[in-house]
Amino acid sequence: MIFRNVLEGVAAMQKIVRIVPWLLAAWIAYIYLWYLQYKFLGHPGSVELFTTLTDWLGAHGHEKAMRIGVGSLELTASLLLFVRPAQAIGAALSLALMTGAIFFHLVSPLGVDPYGDGGVLFKQACATWLASLVLLVLRRDEAIALLAGVPVIGPIAARFA
């Protein structure tokens, strides 16, 4: 009886572990795809945000390239998150994108509340960063296998090989 309950509990946990990565991927993709309309269509709020960033970075006049570039990377991450063999790559790309977003919110003139709405964008960036990290941890075996296939190039990298 106890053994049967333990086995049922293990089976239930295995189902949850199989479902959680897909739920995280769906949430991350939802956030990215929702904001693509603003980035790709040139919404005034998005243009203002990226203008602030490019001006702060000294890349005056390159707002559109940065806005479309970031949006394209977010779209790429969203697509990769739904291709099972590439899910670790999508999670890693998402983690990198959100690390950049959080960094710029904290150190640039944007601040954590650029729209005066209580910092919704910053909070979503933090939540997406955490979801990406958890997904990458859950898919760590695939991520390690992918990294193992990357050739070691250069004198510094050769020292660690």
Image (spheres, rainbow, N blue to C red):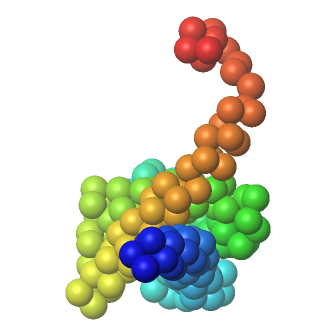
List x then y, in percent, for residue 43: 55, 88
Quadrant the C terminus occupies: top right
115 lies left or right of 146: left
Residue at (61%, 47%) from the top-left corner?
A: 141
The mark tally for this picture is 0
The front one of 27 and 64 is: 27
List x then y, in percent, for residue 110: 32, 69
List x then y, in percent, for residue 125: 40, 72
Q: Is residue 159 above or below residue 61?
A: above
Q: Is residue 70 above or below residue 121?
A: above
- Residue lying farthest to the front in this orientation: 1
Q: Splitting the image into 4 quarters, where does residue 37 fall? A: bottom right
Is residue 60 visible to the viewer in this orientation of the structure? Answer: no
Residue at (76%, 59%) from the top-left corner?
A: 85
Residue at (26%, 72%) from the top-left corner?
A: 112
Is residue 43 visible to the viewer in this orientation of the structure? Answer: yes
Residue at (71%, 73%) from the top-left corner?
A: 82
62 lies left or right of 154: left
The front one of 22 and 63 is: 22
List x then y, in percent, for residue 33: 62, 83
Quadrant the N terminus occupies: bottom left
Q: Splitting the image into 4 quarters, where does residue 2 fall? A: bottom left
Q: Is residue 98 above or below residue 143?
A: below
Q: Splitting the image into 4 quarters, where does residue 63 fall? A: bottom right
